């Protein structure tokens, strides 16, 4: 039986992880390696097919990234994308030229649907183009399989040799039938059956972690969030009690959160867990601080200090485990204006001596991390937990932070979350939480005048948290939450619902 495995060869393109994800979506395993990987290694790898990524260079330029053309003699199916397609054309007797007009953006293309690559697809379809060079002539045995206005050879192929090139980016959503094209390449061209499942990823990841860490000791800062949890459980499966997790309670967590982390990771999953109650320390440092960026900075720095102190108590630690996922890798690489500093708990301590970092989720997207978490036996509630900012409730209490305000907010927030869950809305809403404003207003309870805080409820629908829409929550759900909060949380006498999207607002209030 053929191995259900594809190799993605990287020419420096920005979409390589997205291509990987598209392959995994089709239940086929893939690896990503640099284009300089020796052909012998590719041959021994047991791959069922190769995908060549895009890249910023021109194939005819000196110093352009090169793959050993002997790869073409392996008889493996190959799909080249953008630069990968140009490389293929160039090395199979075709010609690549600099186009008179660069082509960027979504353009209509017409496909030749009698080729296995485009079989069963609509012949007219939008595709995302992003290129300066284009393929002008094809080598013998090849034919054009797609064209757009500016690009007469937008895709080409040799069905017999099972070698294809597409000038457009079929891995992005803008290429409407891109997923179908990848499906066709994997199933029709490579003859795969889609037998790979997340459990296989888990097994391979655990094996690799065992090899890397060996008898060494590892340390992981659990934040309670899904990424660090999945990373920790994966490493725990590989090295057991040689992993120590540290959970720092900075006193700004949601109601019952610290207990829940203990319950799941220590009692249910048997992991070695040190919980540090540092709430006095954090709240002491934060006393009187009102500026949100200042709050973030204090929490970020203090977190690292507490973590370092714990690490020192544990003694020699070889590896630090982090729950970095692929979108974090992209975000940290992109410049631009700093809107919020997004201090994450779990930042890298500077003064602790580690041999290295372990980031087992670096290639995965959020939904894949969730799937893996379920596979590893992490409870569904924990896996589907909405994101919670590192600085916690500190950025949801406007103005100065006191213990009383933290408890008020914890109670009100718990009621809001419960009502959303009861209404069956939890999965549809990207993030929902309560914010304690520092505004007090007049109210009446019984016969007495009150002068209490205004609480704001927030719920947003979002795909990537970069933009968001306020959720159209049914009025009855808002009414039930408001009534319960005002009745059960003394100190709050008015509830408002935030109806602002991002932009212009941000998701958090601070
Ligand atoms: P904003 O408020 O910037 O939030 O629209 C986008 C997403 O980021 C989260 N967020 C943070 N996460 N540290 C974090 O770890 C932070 O300082 C921080 N500030 C915002 C926010 O909860 C939302 O998911």
Image (cartoon, rainbow, N blue to C red):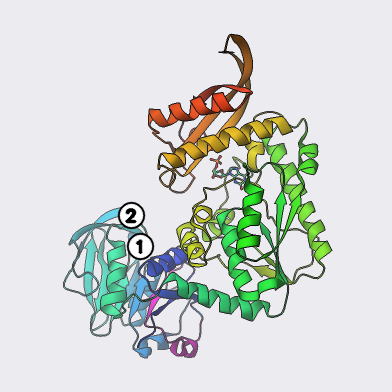
Q: Earlier in the sequence, mark 1 or mark 2?
A: 1
The residue that disc 1 covers is: 169
Residue 344 seen in the figure: no
* Circles 1 and 2: CB atoms closer than 8 Å: yes
Q: Nearer the viewer, residue 386 or 47?
A: 386
Q: Which residues are magenta?
A: 37-59
> Mark 1: few, some, or many residues within 10 Å (few <14, many ≥20)?
many
Q: Is residue 105 above or below residue 63?
A: above
* Figure quadrant of the C terminus: top right
The residue that disc 2 covers is: 174
Which residue occupies 49% across, 68% down?
Answer: 12
Quadrant in which ligand 1 is drawn: top right
Question: Residue 390: x percent and y percent?
Answer: 64, 47
Instruction: Tell whether circle 1 marks a residue whose Cβ is less than 8 angstroms from ligand 1.
Output: no
Which residue sits furthest front? 446
Secondary structure under tag 2 reads loop
Q: Quadrant of residue 219?
A: bottom right
Which residue occupies 58% across, 8% down?
Answer: 447
Q: Nearer the viewer, residue 91 or 490?
A: 490
């Amino acid at each position: 039986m053929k191995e259900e495995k594809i190799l993605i060869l990287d020419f420096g393109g920005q979409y390589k992880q997205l291509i990987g994800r598209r392959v995994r979506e089709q239940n086929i395993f893939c690896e990503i390696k640099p284009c300089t990987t020796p052909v012998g290694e590719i041959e021994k790898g047991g791959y069922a097919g190769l995908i060549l990524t895009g890249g910023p260079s021109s194939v005819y330029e000196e110093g352009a990234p090169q793959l050993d053309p002997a790869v073409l003699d392996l008889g493996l199916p190959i799909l080249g994308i953008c630069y990968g397609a140009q490389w293929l054309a160039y090395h199979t007797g075709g010609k690549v030229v600099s186009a008179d007009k660069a082509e960027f953006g979504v353009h209509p293309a017409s496909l030749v649907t009698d080729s296995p690559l485009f079989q069963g697809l609509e012949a007219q379809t939008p595709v995302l183009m992003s290129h300066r060079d284009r393929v002008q002539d094809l080598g013998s045995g090849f034919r054009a399989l797609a064209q757009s206005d500016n690009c007469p050879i937008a895709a080409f192929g040799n069905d017999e040799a099972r070698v294809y090139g597409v000038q457009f980016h079929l891995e992005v959503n803008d290429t409407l039938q891109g997923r179908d094209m990848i499906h066709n390449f994997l199933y029709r061209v490579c003859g795969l059956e889609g037998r790979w499942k997340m459990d296989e990823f888990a097994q391979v990841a655990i094996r690799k972690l065992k090899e890397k860490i060996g008898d060494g000791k590892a340390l992981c800062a659990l934040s309670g969030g899904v990424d660090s949890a999945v990373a920790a459980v994966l490493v725990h499966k590989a090295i057991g009690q040689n992993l120590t997790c540290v959970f720092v309670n900075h006193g700004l967590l949601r109601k019952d959160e610290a207990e829940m982390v203990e319950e799941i990771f220590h009692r249910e999953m048997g992991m070695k867990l040190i919980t540090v109650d540092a709430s006095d320390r954090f709240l002491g440092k934060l006393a009187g601080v009102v500026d949100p960026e200042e709050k973030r900075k204090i929490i970020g720095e203090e977190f690292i200090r507490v973590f370092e102190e714990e690490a020192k108590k544990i003694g020699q630690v070889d590896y630090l485990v982090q729950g970095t996922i692929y979108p974090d890798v992209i975000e940290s690489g992109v410049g631009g204006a700093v809107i919020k500093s997004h201090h994450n708990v779990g930042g890298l301590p500077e003064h602790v001596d580690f041999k290295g970092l372990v980031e087992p989720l670096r290639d995965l997207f959020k939904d894949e991390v969730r799937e893996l978490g379920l596979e590893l036996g992490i409870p569904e509630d924990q896996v589907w937990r909405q994101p919670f900012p590192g600085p916690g409730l500190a950025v949801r209490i406007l103005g100065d932070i006191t213990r009383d305000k933290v408890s008020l907010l914890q109670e009100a927030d718990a009621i809001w979350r419960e009502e959303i869950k009861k209404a069956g809305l939890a999965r549809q809403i990207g993030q929902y939480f309560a914010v304690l404003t520092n505004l007090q207003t007049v109210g009446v309870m019984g016969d007495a005048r009150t002068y209490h805080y205004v609480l704001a409820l927030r719920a947003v629908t979002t795909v990537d948290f970069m933009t968001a829409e306020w959720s159209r929550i049914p009025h009855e759900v808002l009414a039930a939450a408001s009534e319960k909060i005002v009745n059960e949380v003394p100190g709050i006498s008015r509830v408002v619902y935030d109806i602002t999207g991002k932009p212009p607002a941000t998701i958090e209030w601070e």
